[in-house]
Image: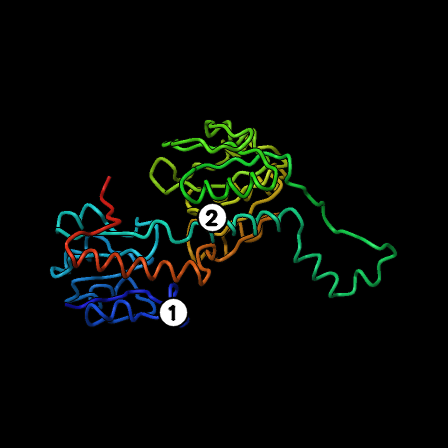
Amino acid sequence: MKIVVLDGYCLNPGDLSWEGLGRFSEVEIFDRTAEEDVVSRAAGAAIVLTNKTPLPAAALRQLPELRYIGVLATGYDIVDLAAATGQGIVVSNIPTYGTASVAQFVFALLLELCHNVRQHADMVRAGAWSRSSDWSFWNSPLVELAGKTMGIIGFGRIGRQAGRIADAMGMRVVANDTYQGDPPPWEGFRWASVEEVLRESDVVSLHSPLFPETEGMINARTLAWMKPSAFLVNTSRGPLVVDQDLADALNAGRLAGAGLDVLSVEPPVDSNPLLTARNCLVTPHIAWATREARSRLMQIAVENVAAFLSGVPRNVVTAA
């Protein structure tokens, strides 16, 4: 039995170990795989692990020995699930590894929008404070979050953890999710429609999965519902947002700022309007990538393979 990892570098650039997979079988690990090389590299493998390398139906048809696909991430839209099911291929994902890290990163982006920490620190290094006539100065408005409203669209594990942090900071939380579950015991918490979340919130944090009905949910029409003083944070999926519409809103002052760890196309093309939009922080999809989170991801990936080989696969995902 052969195991192939198509794009292992992002998960493990050298600070983790692949030994856990090696105990099952021969393992061939590629740092990255171009789409045109997927079939040749995965040929003969019973198990393939992939993070962002697509496995469309056309590729799966050419891999008759493939029995298991392990997605090294929570999102699994890179795999044609209908085709995989039709060929009897089990597909699993890793749903819980990054909850704490991603929620933490939401506030890394948000606090930078509130305080422009890096800009002020760079100004001090450049001598601006030394030259100042005053004992304190700031170059942009400073924003306190306590007492403000945080709206969370997508209230799963990560959304709830972000809400816990917001509540601890003295914010009121309103949330939207298709499946509501038990409401958290935070003062002032309530469920709301997407429109209500966008209209009422001082900060909106996106945590929705990417489905046809959520793609482009943040667009010119829905951005117009938001307060001009509000911030938008997206650490979920880039295509939830229409890039040009958000850039237009930021540049026109209809939105105070945005913190984005994901974009509609990754890596982005140079012409993506959000790269030059007013008060828009863009980071390279790193919310998930703490060593702690990647270690959990690796361990769960190994456990998923072990479960499949034992005949009781776990974290299985199927076509809707």
Position of residue 228 measured from the top left corner of the image (x, y, whole percent): 62, 35
Q: Is residue 311 above or below residue 190?
A: below
**If you read the primary sequence from the N terminus, does the residue marked by circle 1 or circle 2 appear first?**
1
Is 32 in front, or is 46?
46
Quarter of the figure that contains the C terminus: top left
Q: Residue at x 15, y 59 (%)?
A: 66
Q: Quadrant of residue 16?
A: bottom left
Q: Quadrant of residue 202?
A: top right
Which numbered tag is attached to residue 84?
Answer: none
Q: Quadrant of residue 121?
A: bottom right
Is 292 in front, or is 63?
292
Residue position marked by numbered label 1 in the rendering:
16
Q: How far apart are labels 1 and 2 at the CA level?
A: 24 Å
Position of residue 168 measured from the top left corner of the image (x, y, whole percent): 57, 41
Neighbourhood count class around disc 1 (C-alpha, 10 Å): few under 14, some 14–19, many 20 upward: few
Quarter of the figure that contains the N terminus: bottom left
In this rendering, would 48 be left or right of 107? left
Q: Label 1's element?
A: loop
Position of residue 224 measured from the top left corner of the image (x, y, whole percent): 55, 31
- Identity of the amino acid at label 1? Leu
Is 170 in front, or is 235?
170
Which numbered tag is attached to residue 235?
Answer: 2
The single residue placed furthest to the front in the displayed view is 185
Q: Is residue 115 above or below residue 298?
A: above
